[in-house]
Image (cartoon, rainbow, N blue to C red):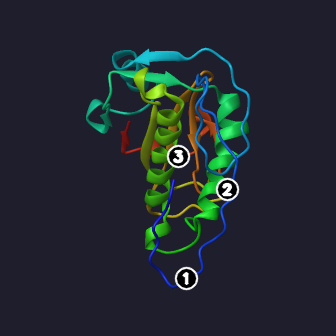
Amino acid sequence: MQYAVSTTEEQPQRPKNQTLQFPGSHTSSLNLNTVQKDFKAPVATIDATTLQWELLSSFEIRPEQLELSDSTYIIPSLKWLKEDFLPYAKTYFSNYGLLGSGEGRDCDNISHAFRHLLVLANAQSGGMTSGDVPCAILKTKQTNPFGGIQAEDAYHTLILIRTDQGWQIIEPQTGENTPFNDYPNKTEASWALL
């Protein structure tokens, strides 16, 4: 994979020959910035109707606040997410200069980058034929601090992802996560794009 960059800023060095293997993958892996882990659990899937019912019945999200774009989703394990993907994403964002201050490096940009990175990992592993990962970009009001981000009277975007242990909230700027039911700003959610 080659990257064309036109800037006068010095680009961070990226580690070479390190891979990330997505749950359910057998031979292919995403060759970016993390150590490959041996993950041989079977791939669990969930259909969009069940996923939508789960979201609407469990959380204070109304139907007009939820958009599902696929019919089937792959459920990653929480263990894989915490031990493999979150450290990988943090290193990736750091190495590519995505973390920091500035309009192009704020919460919505990092949330979209996180979601896209997960899609790439799924595609590289061959998982796209089974479905997408149930990973939403969640917009909420940050009335309480969470994940190293201070409380302020402003909107904030995070990641909402369905794992084998239920729904998790991830602060993509820091990698901190918690079950959705323990997330202090869950009643402030205004939409989720899955």
User: Tag 3: residue type?
Assistant: Asn
Report the disc number at residue 91: 2
Viewer-closest of 118 and 35: 35
Q: Is residue 160 left or right of residue 40?
A: left
Q: Residues within 10 Å of mark 2 (few under 14, many from 20)?
A: some
Residue 174 visible at all: no
Q: Which residue is mark 3?
A: 185
Instruction: Tell me where residue 42 appears, x and y as whole percent.
Output: 61, 14
Toward the left, the furthest residue is 64
Q: Which residue is mark 1?
A: 9
Residue 191 visible at all: yes
Q: Secondary structure at mark 2?
A: helix
In three-dimensional space, the C-alpha distance between marks 2 and 3, rounded to whole angstroms, equals 27 Å
Q: 49 above or below 173?
A: above
If you read the primary sequence from the N terminus, does the residue marked by circle 3 or circle 1 appear first? 1
Q: Residues within 10 Å of mark 3 (few under 14, many from 20)?
A: some
